[in-house]
Amino acid sequence: MTPKPEHIGFDDDRRLDLTATTLDLLPGTPCCFIEVHTRHYHDYVGFARWYYRRRHFLLYQIVLPNNDGHYPWSERAAESFKDWQPNLGAAPKEFS
């Protein structure tokens, strides 16, 4: 019997809770999801708009903290980090 390769990712029966911070995407890195505001679709979501043939659809941004653990909506996050990872929606409720 051939050993099954190590699975990196998610089980087929599991869904992410997009309202909570997760360590499942990048082990050791708490990732958040924010709903992207439709005003950003034109600048950031070109091909998907064509693919779905709609101007608006539900879309989430995966947001990572910087090396100090600050997210782009934090006052303590450096401007260069905020430029690198623009905040395309409202911060999750757990951070407001």
Image: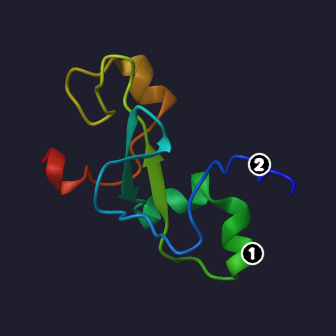
Q: With respect to residue 2, does 73 lie above or below? A: above
Quarter of the rendering occupied by the N terminus: bottom right
Observer-nearest of 77 and 46: 77
Provide residue 59's location: percent of width, then percent of height. Answer: 49, 66
> Are the residues tagged 2 and 1 within 8 Å (C-beta)?
no
Side (left or right) of 13 relative to 92: right
Observer-nearest of 70 and 80: 70
Q: Amino acid at mark 2?
A: Pro
Provide residue 49's location: percent of width, then percent of height. Answer: 66, 71
Taking the view exactly as shown, the residue that stands out farthest to the bottom is: 53
Provide residue 66's location: percent of width, then percent of height. Answer: 39, 23
Q: Secondary structure at mark 2?
A: loop
From the image, tell me which residue sits under label 1: 51
Q: Amino acid at mark 1?
A: Tyr
Which residue is found at the position 28% from the left and 56% from the top?
Answer: 20
Q: Which image quadrant for residue 45?
A: bottom right
Q: Nearer the viewer, mark 2 or mark 1?
A: 2
Which residue is found at the position 54% from the left and 61% from the top?
Answer: 41
Provide residue 11's location: percent of width, then percent of height. Answer: 56, 65
From the image, tell me which residue sits under label 2: 5
Which residue is found at the position 19% from the left and 26% from the top?
Answer: 75
The dot on residue 67 is none
Which residue is found at the position 76% from the left and 48% from the top?
Answer: 5
Number of other residues with Cα within 10 Å of mark 2, as a class: few under 14, some 14 to 19, many 20 or more? few
- Mark 2 or mark 1: name the one nearer the start of the chain: 2
Q: With respect to residue 46, does 71 lie above or below? A: above
Q: With respect to residue 23, does 75 lie above or below? A: above
Q: Secondary structure at mark 1?
A: helix
3D distance between C-alphas at marks 2 and 1: 33 Å
Taking the view exactly as shown, the residue that stands out farthest to the front is: 1
